[in-house]
Image: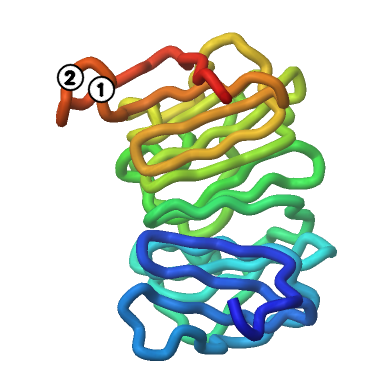
Amino acid sequence: MAGLADVVDLAAYEHRTCALRRGGAIVCWHAFADEPLAQERTIAGAVEIVIGAAHACTRDASGKVRCWGTNHSGRLGDGTTESRDADVAVRGLDDAVALAAGRLHTCALRRGGDVVCWGDGMLGQLGDGSRADRAAPTRVPDLGPARAVAAGEDATCSIGQAGRVHCWGDGAGAGGRFAPELVGDAPADVLAVGAQSACSSDGERVACWGAGLSPQRPRAWDVVTTPRAIPLP
């Protein structure tokens, strides 16, 4: 894209994409926008950006997280449900090493391996065993130290220290789980979560699960609850 030669991170949700530039400038574009690029703000020191349906968050190198946007269910993590045009600090979170955002929730991986989530919990996407919304980071219990976290529309998954994948929430094969549940037994190094499916890889093999178009039945959906190996060219 013309004019973008210093991007350090990208995030997308539905028709909206945002780029985090070196120095902390954030530019976004929309599939239906007249102007292809619009600078939203600058957050000095930011190294990662995630976006949801109507909110966004960044993480800086020290581990602090700032969010802005719609906040009806607490997805900004500042302890309130007040929507913000200006970015605000996520309460009590200063050691994040990775972020993930779904449609109405946000999660962070902390330096010690804990996963914390906040925002809408109606479908179990916060992983704390309840349907409650959380306006500040809430630890996902019974997960153990994690090394990666990813989120889709209403689901969240993590990779543990032994490479085991756990998921919770609705979609991505999680099926309305309110606490983390093990997905398959194959180890993983990388993980991606979509609206209704997820995939993991150990660097050599890719396995996916969730809902997808059936290869045997045209215009029909299959739901795969156990990770299925995907043949690669």
Residue under circle 1?
Answer: 214
How many tags in the picture? 2
Secondary structure beneath dot 2 equals: loop
Above or below, 206 against 10 in this view is above
Q: Residue furthest right?
A: 62
Give residue 50's quadrant in the image. bottom right
Q: Which numbered dot is residue 163?
A: none
Quadrant containing the C terminus is: top right
Q: Residue furthest top?
A: 185
Residue occupying image coordinates x 73% and y 54%: 96
Q: CB under 8 Å between callouts 2 and 1?
A: yes
* Horizontal side, residue 54 vs residue 213: left or right: right
Residue occupying image coordinates x 42% and y 90%: 35
Q: Amino acid at mark 2?
A: Arg
Q: Amino acid at mark 1?
A: Ser
Give residue 95's quadrant in the image. bottom right
Q: Residue furthest front?
A: 233
Instruction: Note whether residue 82 is visible.
Output: no
In this picture the colour scheme is rainbow
Q: Position of residue 72 (x, y in %)?
A: 34, 67
Quadrant containing the N terminus is: bottom right
Above or below, 113 against 210 in this view is below
Q: Which numbered dot is residue 217?
A: 2
Q: Spatial distance from mark 2 to mark 1, Cα to Cα?
A: 5 Å
Between 111 and 4, the one nearer to me in the picture: 4
Instruction: Note whether residue 14 is visible.
Output: yes
Q: Position of residue 179 (x, y in %)?
A: 46, 27
- 10 Å crowding of disc 2: few (<14), some (14-19), many (20+): few
Residue occupying image coordinates x 50% and y 44%: 151
